[in-house]
Image (cartoon, rainbow, N blue to C red):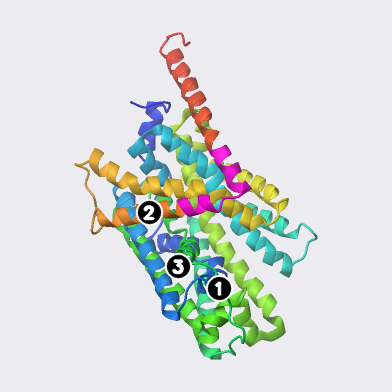
Amino acid sequence: MLLGPDRNLQRRQETSILRKTLTILQASAVVVGAVVGIGIFKTPSVVAANVTSEAAFLGLWLLGGVVTLIGALCYAELGSTYPHFGGEYHFLRKAYGPGLGFLFAWGRMAVMQSGSIAAVAFVYGDYASFLFPVGASGSAVHAALAVISLSALQLMGTELSSGGQVALTTASVAVVLVVSVIGLAVGSQPAPTQPAAINGSAGRAMVFILLTYGGWSEAAYISGEVRDARRDIPRALLIGTATVTALYLLANYSYLTAFGLEGLRQSNAVAADLVRVVFGAKAAVVVAGIVCVTSLSTLNATILTGARSIFALGRSFTPFAVLGRPGAGGRSPRNAILVQSAVTIGLLVFGAFSRDGFESMVEYTAPVFWTFMLLVGVSLFVLRWRDPKRAIPFPVPLYPVTPVLFCGTAAYLLYSSLLYAGAGALLSVGIFLAGIPIFRLGRRATARNRATRCGVKGP
């Protein structure tokens, strides 16, 4: 029995009302574009400071790719079996009921996706303001302009925005390849004379590695718009994660070739240091351009997928029905994009007054994000148990070992995010919990409306 959503809305939710226009190339570009971003230019130095050998350094990056592949295999089963524009919202709702589904969509709208968009936008803003200064608040201004511009692109339709994503992803991949070639070509650079201390452990290194690999799960939100989801979603996830893993291994091997492990440990911005070897005084401009390109690719992919769970919420929860209205011809989830943009701008304003906008957004999103990643992993077991006769186009290999490993990874990262939580995390938890009374009030309003339509006086 449904608790809150209207039955007619629920029936409409089962059939995607957004057009199925995405090809496997465009779906794969969303996966790669959502993952390949600023992390590969920032985190290798942190990872190097937490390992004792070059073999361990490359081995952990390979392990990160394997963990990402494990998660992608789990999502491939869920996405191909239950293709839907709501992605994880749809999986959780089917597995646990509308209450938890609502909390996920609420958390994604107010915390997870909007916070992730804001975090990447702040990095873009930092570098864009270096290239085009606009005053003391230049970073926040550029960040807001990027969010508004890319959201406007999404409003023009999925076909146009996904075409733009292919172009941005191609540019990002090209940038990583160019940086990697530079590292392989310049040869070994002089090693530091004073060795750096090892700061932590392999476990801490994996937190940063998996953060750099993050974003692959966004493919779940376009499963309702892929032409043949049951065939192409698994392929897009596998092609995307394999491409990212190969790119990251190549980039990190090139960093080691140029600087060695000790040099990596003492580099605050390894890509900048690498480019400086070739371009000298002009390196800062080159690096700023590199980061802007990769940031825009991640932003566009994240905005594209982010509005889908908000749209799905509007299609299934009557009080938020306005969010489920598509644009003309079903080309985009119009109102969901507008709301996501407004929430993100609000977070940009909040971050602009904090010590570091990017770090505050990472703290803001992490605990809620990994809580739901864990619940999605468990939902694979729940759905197999509750829906045993459902055809599974792509069964996850080595079941149940694969999803158990995925759930274990998510649980560990949830623990780590809570261990290092700051004020931003406490704020996000408070906003997330505010979804509970909102759901209950909405459920009561829906029950009263239903009773009124049936001619029964409500309480």
The span from disc 2 to disc 3 (Cα, nearest Å) is 38 Å
Identify the residue at horizontal 46%, vertical 50% (top origin): 370
Task: Kindly indicate whether the residue at mark 2 contacts the one at mark 1 (C-beta within 8 angstroms).
Answer: no
* Image quadrant assignment for residue 53: bottom left
Question: Residue 202 shows which numbered tag?
Answer: 3
**Whole-percent x and y of residue 253?**
46, 81
**Whole-percent x and y of residue 59?**
40, 74
Q: Earlier in the sequence, mark 3 or mark 1?
A: 1
Question: Residue 108 shows which numbered tag?
Answer: none
Q: Is residue 433 above or below residue 254?
A: above
> Would residue 153 be seen by someone viewing this image from the given angle?
no
Q: Is residue 410 above or below residue 255?
A: above
- Is residue 423 rendered magenta in the image? yes
The span from disc 3 to disc 1 (Cα, nearest Å) is 13 Å
**Whole-percent x and y of residue 398?**
23, 58
Under circle 2, the secondary element is loop
Q: Residue furthest left?
A: 389
Q: Residues within 10 Å of mark 1 (few under 14, many from 20)?
A: many
- Is residue 409 rendered magenta in the image? no
Mark 1 — residue?
Answer: 45
**Whole-percent x and y of residue 377?**
35, 49
The residue segment tinted magenta is: 415-432
Amino acid of disc 3: Ala
Identify the residue at horizontal 39%, vertical 71% (top origin): 62
**Which of the pair 347/200 is nearer the observer?**
200
Q: Earlier in the sequence, mark 1 or mark 2?
A: 1
Label 2 vs label 3, nearer the camera: 3
Mark 2 — residue?
Answer: 226
Identify the residue at horizontal 33%, vertical 46% (top origin): 378
Under circle 1, the secondary element is helix
